[in-house]
Amino acid sequence: MIHYQITPVDPKAHLFAVTMTVSEPKAVQVFSLPAWLPGSYMVRDFAKNIIELKATDETGHPLNLNSSINRPGRLTITAPKSP
């Protein structure tokens, strides 16, 4: 299950903090943003509006983030390998 929490940081500037929690994540998770809106044929780059992005495990340790230049809006999160 995926849970989202949206917190207004500066509503007048349309700035919000979004927290996404994945209850049972895989070792490698891939997320993507759409490139279009229903009813619109214009391709858009919604990823350009992301100011900061980070991923952590359940204990708060950072995870690896990789985005694809060829596919803007696509993000791969990889958990570190266990020793």
Image (cartoon, helix red, strand yellow):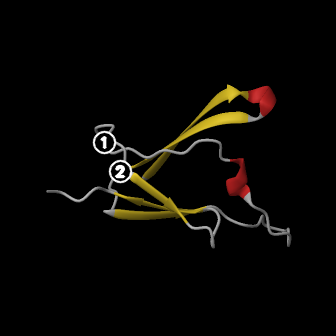
For the C terminus, which image quadrant? bottom left
**Residue beneath label 1, please?**
58
The residue sitting at 59% across, 42% down in the picture is 52
Q: Is residue 74 above or below residue 79?
A: below
Q: Amino acid at mark 1?
A: Glu
Earlier sequence position, callout 1 versus callout 2: 2
For the N terminus, which image quadrant? bottom left
The residue sitting at 31% across, 42% down in the picture is 58
Mark 2 lies on a secondary structure that is: loop
Q: Is residue 9 left or right of residue 13?
A: left
Q: Residues within 10 Å of mark 2 (few under 14, many from 20)?
A: few
The residue sitting at 76% across, 35% down in the picture is 14
Which residue is at the far left?
A: 83
Question: How many marks overall?
Answer: 2
Q: Amino acid at mark 2?
A: Ser
Seen from the viewer's position, the closer of residues 13 and 20 is 13
What is the number of the mark on residue 23? 2
Task: Give the percent coordinates (x, y) of residue 57.
Answer: 33, 45
Circle 1/circle 2 CB separation < 8 Å:
no
Task: Give the percent coordinates (x, y) of residue 37.
Answer: 78, 64
Task: Give the percent coordinates (x, y) of residue 54.
Answer: 48, 44
Cα distance in 3D space between marks 1 and 2:
9 Å
Q: Is residue 18 left or right of residue 77?
A: right
